[in-house]
């Protein structure tokens, strides 16, 4: 009955498991086929060029919603028996297909049209055509349009595509993403339930086998797996209970009842044998007593050993505690000394920097004063030169005027001579005129003399002015010499200041070296302390294990002692029972003697009769012992069988998860990787979020909140995802605000048909990260994107870290770079780089990979690009890691995290010092 009930329960559990494993909308169909509702008819589109059906489309429910209004169900209008949809404007070609559903006026919406645009593409890498749903358009009110970009809605051309939900709502897997969040697309929502479509290759007017979007980890399948595991546990427990019940039944069947005989049937010939048995039993009793005494002595010895070891372990623990306290005090002293040294170092560095800054300010002030004095002197010299030029011009003008006057005098003298000749000719006639002319000549001579005197006076004045100007020039020259001497003295002072600054720099370098040496000493002391502490911990663990072993041995000995005590008690009880039996036998003997005396039978010796009765009692007890021994053997065999079955069941239970793990590893290895990354995200405190922007749906993981320290945004490499930073994040402080984003087309971030992989700040604007300057980190392709972002939006960043970035023109190219450049020149690539689309491209890729060797120096990205960036960027620091490949984040996570933190801290210190100087 119990087995029957268990089988009924098992059948009920299996039925529940089948219900949970199936989708919830299929369970009623299994329970009652009569309640099945006939499905809606599918839409068939016949193109104009051949007349065959090229599009098959159906859905159990089609609903749209504008903003926060209720959903408008269009299922009856599109798929119902009285459907009023118009599909005449649908178009089919070999490469493109458009399904147009003209619904007309629906409630407040006029001219409602839903269009599904699909494309057919041949992929050479796969060798077959795939059809893709590119976009879904909603036309309403004759002029307005809402566009949704479809993601991950594709299937081979020989298959149909099926998905339980194709929707723009975030509670489902969002396959329809609004093309823009600025127009009306963000105000609409569309949902297809039980969506199935096939295009370009429809045969026999029926849907082909479907390529389902459901992953392995659906809720129904997970519930089925969980219930199957529960059923396995219940089945194992039931088998264990059945086996246990069978063993109990067998044990009860083999039990025998033993009765003491009421009559004595033994003869006098068995007296000798009974005596031997009694002697043998007495010897066994003595041996048992000896064993008990030996066990007691061993227990006493073991207790003494345990007490000694406990004392020794206590002494060792006390000594180790004292040593730990001493080490802790030493550590505290070392930490205090380190802090004092750091404070001294910081104070000395600050004082040196302040002195250097003061010297630089004095030098700048002296240079400014020298520049001002030189400019003033140059202005004075230029003004004096201008005055000299004006004076010389005036002198030249006066000289020209004097020359003119002399020429006039010469001309007048010539005229006078001519007149004298004429007067001589007309001597007498013009006597009166000559006198007049003489008078005029005298007056003219007087005027000439006055002019000459004036000229001499003016020349003397000019000479005086010239002498004064020359004296001023000499004084200016002397002043100039004095200023030059001062300049030389200032230059000497500048040289001395430079020497002092060089000495200060040397002292700072010496201080830095001393700091490095101190850090090395501290690290060595820390390592020694860690080694000592680890040794002490190991010793403590060994002591603990030893004490545990001794405790186990002590417990075992106590158990043995308790067993021996129980045996002794049993032996004493047996002795008491035997004494009672002997007394009963003696009483029976007396009664028998009386009977024998009455019957005429005489016994020679009463002691022999007593022995004979005791022998009979021992014989009866021996039979009972044999029966008990048989029962014990059978019970032990049953227990052994029970243990074997338990081990078999345990092995089966262990085999089930192992088989599941192997199945996942062979069939769905990506699920194991996802579980691994989920575990690390959970342990590191990262949470996954989604952000929609301009047709993209960005997936990113975040930890912490924005604080005083800058946030850190990390961009991954090509063909990787955001979880590649997990190995480095575990070495970063938990107080930092960290963001790891999937680039477009990678992992959780969608991609559009435009194949544009440059984010250009979309993600940063969407999550409002640019409210405060943040630190940007990028590796390889992510470094390229980070550099472009820094060039476009420099105000959004406080600093940036590039790890093996691409897109830099290197001064020296490797063999791999040359071969890649050669292949780009000879055969231009039409597809995406690093993803071959033809067999020839695959062969070229394999040949190219032969040029890549994983050694140091690394041959994929040349190191010279780092120095080019250092020359081009101000305040740039270059760190080179040896014995490391291109994936620095995964190979050296600890060192990369340390370098990034050091750089961020140094930049923050620089910003703080600059702000203090400004104030």
Image (cartoon, rainbow, N blue to C red):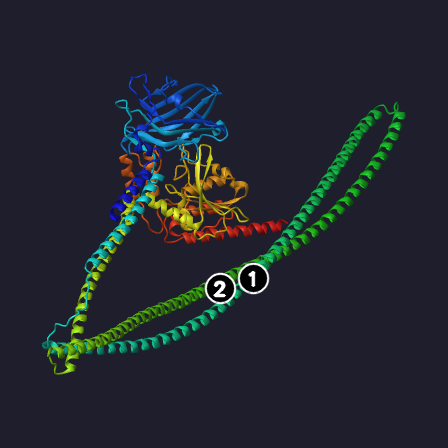
Direction from residue 734 to residue 290 in the image, left or right: left
Q: Residue 347: x percent and y percent?
A: 58, 60
* Mark 1 and mark 2 residues within 8 Å of each other at the beta carbon: no
Q: Quadrant of residue 360?
A: bottom right
| Element assignment for label 2 | helix
Location of mark 1 (residue): 343
Badge 1 element: helix
Q: Which mark is residue 518?
A: 2
Farthest bottom residue?
Answer: 605
Residue at figure coordinates x 47%, y 69% from the top left: 325
Q: Residue reaching furthest left?
A: 269
Q: Quadrant of residue 482?
A: bottom right
Viewer-closest of 219 and 918: 219
Residue visible at 19% across and 71% down?
621
Q: Within 10 Å of the Cα at label 2, are there few (<14), some (14-19), or many (20+) other Cα atoms?
A: some
Quadrant hosting residue 321: bottom left
Question: Can residue 218 be seen in the rendering of this structure?
Answer: no
* 611 or 899, nearer to the observer: 611
Residue 266's spot in the image, x, y percent?
12, 73
The single residue placed furthest to the right in the displayed view is 432
Name the residue located 38 percent from the left edge and 49 percent from the top edge.
Answer: 890
Q: How many marks?
A: 2
Q: Is disc 1 surrounded by few (<14), some (14 to 19) or many (20+) residues within 10 Å? A: few
């Amino acid at each position: 009955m119990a087995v029957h009930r268990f089988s009924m329960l098992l059948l009920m559990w299996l039925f529940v498991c089948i219900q949970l494993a199936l989708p919830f909308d299929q369970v009623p169909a299994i329970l009652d086929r009569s309640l099945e509702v006939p499905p809606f008819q599918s839409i068939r589109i016949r193109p104009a060029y051949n007349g065959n059906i090229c599009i098959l489309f159906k859905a159990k429910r089609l609903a749209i919603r504008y903003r926060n209004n209720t959903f408008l169900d269009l299922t009856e209008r599109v798929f119902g028996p009285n459907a009023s949809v118009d599909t005449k404007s649908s178009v089919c070609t070999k490469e493109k297909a458009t399904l147009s559903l003209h619904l007309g006026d629906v409630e407040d919406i006029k001219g409602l049209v839903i269009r599904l645009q699909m494309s057919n593409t041949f992929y050479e890498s796969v060798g077959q055509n795939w059809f893709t749903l590119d976009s879904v358009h909603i036309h309403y009110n004759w002029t307005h349009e809402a566009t949704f970009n479809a993601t991950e809605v594709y299937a081979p051309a020989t298959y149909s595509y099926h998905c339980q939900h194709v929707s723009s709502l975030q509670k489902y897997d969002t396959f329809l993403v609004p093309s823009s969040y600025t127009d009306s697309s963000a105000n609409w929502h569309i949902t297809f339930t039980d969506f199935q479509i096939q295009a370009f290759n429809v045969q026999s007017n029926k849907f082909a086998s479907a390529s389902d979007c459901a992953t392995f980890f659906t809720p129904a399948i997970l519930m089925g797996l969980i219930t199957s595991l529960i059923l396995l546990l219940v089945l194992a427990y039931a088998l264990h209970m059945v086996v246990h019940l069978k063993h109990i039944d067998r044990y009860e069947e083999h039990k025998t009842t033993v009765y003491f005989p009421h009559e004595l049937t033994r003869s006098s010939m068995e007296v000798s044998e009974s005596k031997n048995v009694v002697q043998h039993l007495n010897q066994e009793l003595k041996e048992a007593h000896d064993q008990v005494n030996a066990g007691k002595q061993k227990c006493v010895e073991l207790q003494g050993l345990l007490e000694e070891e406990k004392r020794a372990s206590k002494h060792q623990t006390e000594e180790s505690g004292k040593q730990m306290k001493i080490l802790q005090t030493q550590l505290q002293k070392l930490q205090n000394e380190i802090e004092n040294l750091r404070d001294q170092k910081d104070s000395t560095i600050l004082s040196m920097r302040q002195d250097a800054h003061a010297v630089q300010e004095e030098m700048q002030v002296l240079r400014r004063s020298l520049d001002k004095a030189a400019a003033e002197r140059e202005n004075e010299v230029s003004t004096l030169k201008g005055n000299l030029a004006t004076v010389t011009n005036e002198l030249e003008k006066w000289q020209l005027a004097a020359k003119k006057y002399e020429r006039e005098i010469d001309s007048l003298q010539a005229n006078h001579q001519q007149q004298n000749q004429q007067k001589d000719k007309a001597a007498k006639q013009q006597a009166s005129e000559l006198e007049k002319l003489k008078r005029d000549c005298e007056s003219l001579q007087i005027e000439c003399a006055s002019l000459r005197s004036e000229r001499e006076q003016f020349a003397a004045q000019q000479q005086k002015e010239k002498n004064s100007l020359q004296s001023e020039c000499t004084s200016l020259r002397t002043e100039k010499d004095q200023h030059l001497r001062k300049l030389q003295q200032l230059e000497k002072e500048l040289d001395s200041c430079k020497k002092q600054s060089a000495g200060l720099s040397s002292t700072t370098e010496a201080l830095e070296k001393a700091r490095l040496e101190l850090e090395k000493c501290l690290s060595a002391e820390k390592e020694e302390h860690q080694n000592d502490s680890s040794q002490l911990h190991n010793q403590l663990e060994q002591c603990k294990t030893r004490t545990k072993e001794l405790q186990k041995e002590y417990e075992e000995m106590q158990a043995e002692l308790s067993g021996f005590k129980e045996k002794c008690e049993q032996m004493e009880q047996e002795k008491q029972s035997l004494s009672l039996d002997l007394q009963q036998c003696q009483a029976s003997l007396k009664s028998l003697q009386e009977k024998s005396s009455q019957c005429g039978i005489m016994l020679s010796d009463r002691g022999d009769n007593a022995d004979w009765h005791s022998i009979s009692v021992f014989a009866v007890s021996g039979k009972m012992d044999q029966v008990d021994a048989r029962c014990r053997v059978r019970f032990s065999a049953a227990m052994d069988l029970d243990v074997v079955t338990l081990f078999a069941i345990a092995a089966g239970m262990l085999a089930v998860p192992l088989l599941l793990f192997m199945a996942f590893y062979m069939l769905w290895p990506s699920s194991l990787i996802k579980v691994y990354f989920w575990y690390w995200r959970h342990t590191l405190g990262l949470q996954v979020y989604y952000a929609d922007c301009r047709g993209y749906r960005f997936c990113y993981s975040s930890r912490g909140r924005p604080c005083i320290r800058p946030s850190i945004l990390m961009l991954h490499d090509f063909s990787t995802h955001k979880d590649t930073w997990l190995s480095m994040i575990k070495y970063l402080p938990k107080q930092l605000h960290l963001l790891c984003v999937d680039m477009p087309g990678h992992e959780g971030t969608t991609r559009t048909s435009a194949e544009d992989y440059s984010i250009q700040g979309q993600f940063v604007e969407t999550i409002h990260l640019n409210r405060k300057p943040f630190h940007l980190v990028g590796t390889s392709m992510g470094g390229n994107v980070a550099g472009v972002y820094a060039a476009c939006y420099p105000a959004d960043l406080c600093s940036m870290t590039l790890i093996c970035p691409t897109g830099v023109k290197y001064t020296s190219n490797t063999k791999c770079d040359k071969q890649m450049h050669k292949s780009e020149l000879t055969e231009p690539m039409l597809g995406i780089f690093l993803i071959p689309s033809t067999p020839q491209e695959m062969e070229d890729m394999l040949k190219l990979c032969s040029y890549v060797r994983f050694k140091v120096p690394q041959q994929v990205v040349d190191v010279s690009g780092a120095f080019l960036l250092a020359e081009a960027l101000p305040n740039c620091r270059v760190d080179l890691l040896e014995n490391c490949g291109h994936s620095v984040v995964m190979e050296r996570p600890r060192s990369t995290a340390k370098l990034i933190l050091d750089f961020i801290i140094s930049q923050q210190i620089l910003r703080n010092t600059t702000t203090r100087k400004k104030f």
